[in-house]
Amino acid sequence: MLAGSLSERITIETRTKTEDSFGTPSSTWTTLKEVSAKVTQNPGQKIFNNNPDHLYHSYNTRFEFRYLSGFNYDCRIKYEGDYYTIQSIEKLRRNIGFVVIAERNTNDGY
């Protein structure tokens, strides 16, 4: 992984589970770290969800960045104001980094 190819800044957020004073569980997102990454946009897809009237677009993006302790499927990525749900994580050899495929989420509070 060449440092010069990591030209974009992304924010890795992790889900933090908390309880209010009544014991009701809730979760919030906290920043794990802001890192440099290589970002590759894949072409979008139109997907029908059992009904042609319910069309939505899927935009998968590939993120490559250096190894980050604590990064897992409970995290999400923020890039250019959009949030991305992690679909797959591939560790690069000798834990030098990750290749992550993520889908842009149009609802930032999922």
Image: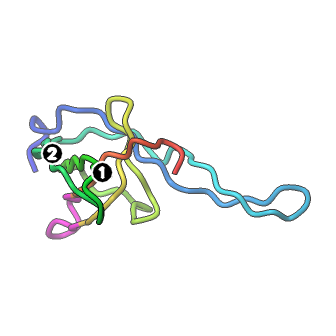
Answer few, some or many: residues within 10 Å of disc 1's Cα (few below 14, many 20 plus, some between 14 and 19): few
**96 within the magenta span:** yes
Say if mark 2 contacts mark 1, CB within 8 Å: no
Q: Which residue is mark 1?
A: 53
Q: Indicate the colouring scheme.
A: rainbow
Q: Nearer the viewer, residue 77 or 104?
A: 104
Q: Give the residue displayed 17% in from the left and 41% down from the top.
A: 39
Q: Amino acid at mark 1?
A: Asp
Q: How far across and how far down the image is residue 15, in percent?
A: 55, 56
Q: Which residue is mark 2?
A: 44
The residue at 14%/41% (across/down) is 41
Task: Decide: is 67 above or below 78.
Answer: below
**Mark 2: secondary structure:** loop
Q: Which residue type does callout 2 highlight?
A: Gly
Q: Nearer the viewer, residue 99 or 103?
A: 103
Q: Position of residue 40 (x, y in %)?
A: 13, 43
Q: CA distance from mark 2 to mark 1?
A: 18 Å
Q: In the figure, is residue 47 to the left or right of 35?
A: left
Residue ID at (50%, 54%): 14
Left or right of residue 55, residue 45 in this image: left
What's the magenta region? 90-99
Q: Residue at x 8, y 44 (%)?
A: 2
Residue 35: image quadrant is top left
Q: Is residue 88 above or below residue 9?
A: below
Residue 99: percent from left, percent from top: 19, 58
Q: Nearer the viewer, mark 2 or mark 1?
A: 1
Name the element at disc 1. loop
Whether residue 75 is in magenta: the answer is no
Q: Is residue 97 visible?
A: no
Query: Which residue is nearer to you in this view: 4 or 73?
Result: 73
